[in-house]
Amino acid sequence: MPPAIILKTQFSTSKFKGYLKYINDEKSNKANHDKKKIQSLNQDIENINNEMSNLNLNSYSSYIIGYMKNNSITKKDNQNKKKVIKRTTAPFNNNSYTLDNKELNKLKDDFDTAEKQGCINYQDIITFDNDFLIKNHLYDAKTDELNEDVIKKATIKMINRMIKDENMNPYQTRWMANIHYDTDNIHIHISTTELKNTRKIITNGNGKVEIKGKRRKKTLENMKSSFSNSLLDSTKYLENITQVRNDLYHNFKIRTDELETLQAIKNLKKQLPVSKKHWQYNNKEVKHLQPDIDKITTSIVNRNNVHSYNQYMESIGYVANFYKEIYGENSN
């Protein structure tokens, strides 16, 4: 089973205006603004990149005002069947769920400033398996309605996490995103840059000074994790798990006449590690005791509120399947 959510990342460098132009030999700093095609895991993302290339965008502001502008893409017969001409939402970011023209023009100016400073422009794409969105009540295929607020909230959390993990200055970072319906799979485009570079300056193999644009693997992992966790929060399953777990903790009791269970607990405690920091079910120091723990737990559950326990386990199962779908069958 392939992942239900795919995060594809790339970055572009500007014309090396500003301090990079000063540092490097001007003759060797020719502009190169062709956007690299994202090596797609599916045809859908490849189509997205083809659309971007056809627009011949040659600057950061052209990218956000051109391809990402909400009236630039029209409906095609083989695309999502939303009965509107515009196939993408209005741009959004952490300041507004719907950026107006004034805000968008300010962003354009900021992206132009970033380009002149030689800053990195990150261009990320999140693409969905629409069946996953339908299953989790985030998308209604019949009406072609997406719960955009939930998707936007998850995107904001993801970018905020990236800014934190990459030690970027949140006050000097500019980004915008929008949701596209123009292919068979709904996807999000995100463009991020800095007004003042905070990326590491390195010397490449050719002896040229350049900005290190590549983000850490952990950053990318946390980006997807933050996005996924936000989607899961919207389902209220985690909230339900916490509530039911607390109820179980307060309601489950061991009667004084349950001598067999009390003795089993006493014997188990004798075998536990001295340090309580190892008292976790999946801890390697406790793994050999799992059968005994399971037996005691089952005995207590059967004597108490079985319905609450079953409800708890159902919620746990839902969450496990949720992440399995997001990351794929064979993921860790």
Image: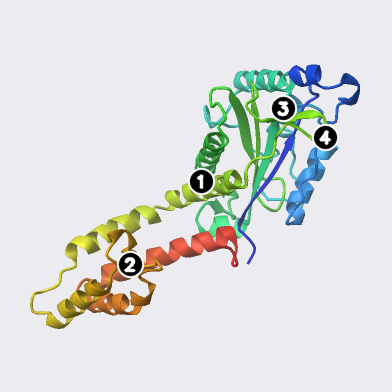
Q: Nearer the viewer, mark 1 or mark 4?
A: 1
Please indicate whether residue 25 sits to the left or right of residue 314 in the image.
right
Residue 250 appears at what percent x and percent y? Answer: 18, 61
Residue 295 higher or lower than 219, as above or below: below
Residue with the mark numbered 4: 55
**Mark 2: few/some/many CA within 10 Å (<14, 14-19, 20+):** some
State the separation of the CA atoms marked 2 and 3: 49 Å
User: Disc 1 vs disc 2: Cβ atoms closer than 8 Å?
Assistant: no
Q: Is residue 221 visible?
A: yes
Residue 307 higher or lower than 62, as above or below: below
User: Disc 1 vs disc 3: Cβ atoms closer than 8 Å?
Assistant: no
Name which residue type carries label 2: Gln
In this rendered view, identify the residue nearer to me: 181 or 212. 212
State the separation of the CA atoms marked 1 and 4: 31 Å
**Mark 1: few/some/many CA within 10 Å (<14, 14-19, 20+):** many
Q: Earlier in the sequence, mark 2 or mark 3?
A: 3
Q: Nearer the viewer, mark 1 or mark 3?
A: 1
In this rendered view, identify the residue nearer to me: 50 or 245. 245
The colouring scheme, among rainbow, by chain, secondary structure or one colour, is rainbow
- The residue under the point 33% across, 76% down is 289
Name which residue type carries label 1: Ser
Residue with the mark numbered 3: 65
SS state under label 2 = helix
Which residue reaches farthest bottom? Answer: 260
Name which residue type carries label 4: Leu
SS state under label 1 = helix
Q: Quadrant of the N terminus?
A: bottom right
User: Label for residue 226?
Assistant: 1
- The residue under the point 70% across, 53% down is 184
Residue with the mark numbered 2: 311
Please indicate whether residue 12 sits to the left or right of residue 232 in the image.
right
Q: Is residue 90 visible?
A: no
